[in-house]
Each structure stands twice: as C-alpha cells, then as structure tokens.
Amino acid sequence: MLPILLVRQDIAQQRLQQVFTDFSAPNLVVSLSSRQHLPKITQEFIAFVIENLNFYLNQHN
C-alpha cells in the first residue's frame, strides 16, 4: 500500500486503481527530543522531508 500523496496523479490518470477505498492507515508520529546529536545526514534528511512534505500539502490543500 502506498500513501495517497504518492499515487494521487496515477489514480486520476487511471494508471492505478484504488482497491481498499475504506482503508485509512493510522497516523504515524515521530518525536525527537533533540536533533543535536543526530548525524548530519539524518538532520538533512529530516529537513528535506519537512520542506517537501509542506510544499506538497500546501499545493494540494
């Protein structure tokens, strides 16, 4: 199963078909007490995800 934000366009263009229409994945929460001791690559990944997810959500809401 893929998040709708990754496949919305494919469903709209009928390249994919939604099978479990009533299914909703549970929310996932990630909590970090501090980014201070995380490896630099992990910090960069978190920044990338936040930036791109915010862009996507603002574009599609």
Image (cartoon, grey):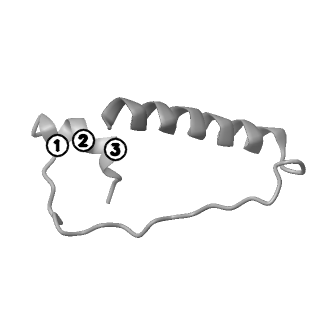
From the image, which quarter does the N terminus lie in? bottom left
Callouts 2 and 1 close, C-beta under 8 Å: yes
Q: Which residue is mark 1?
A: 11
Disc 2/disc 1 C-alpha distance (Å): 5 Å
Q: Which mark is residue 2?
A: none
**Residue pictured at 14% horizontal, 62% vertical:** 19
Residue 57, located in which quarter of the rendered image? top left
**Residue pictured at 35% horizontal, 52% vertical:** 3
Label 1 is placed on what type of residue?
A: Ile
SS assignment at label 1: helix
Label 2 is placed on what type of residue?
A: Arg
Q: Which residue is mark 3?
A: 5
Badge 2: residue crowd in 10 Å (few <14, some 14–19, many ≥20): some
Foreground mark, 1 or 3?
Answer: 3
SS assignment at label 3: helix
From the image, which quarter does the C terminus lie in? top left
The residue closer to the viewer here, 2 or 4, is 4
Q: Which residue is mark 2?
A: 8
Q: Residue furthest right?
A: 37
Callouts 1 and 3 close, C-beta under 8 Å: no
Disc 1/disc 3 C-alpha distance (Å): 11 Å
Residue 22, located in which quarter of the rendered image? bottom left
In primary-sequence order, the first of circles 1 and 3 is 3
* Position above or below: 36 against 48: below
Left or right: 22 in relation to 46? left
Left or right: 15 in relation to 35? left
Badge 3: residue crowd in 10 Å (few <14, some 14–19, many ≥20): few
Label 3 is placed on what type of residue?
A: Leu
**Residue pictured at 83% horizontal, 54% vertical:** 34
The percent coordinates of residue 47 (x first, y second) are 67, 36
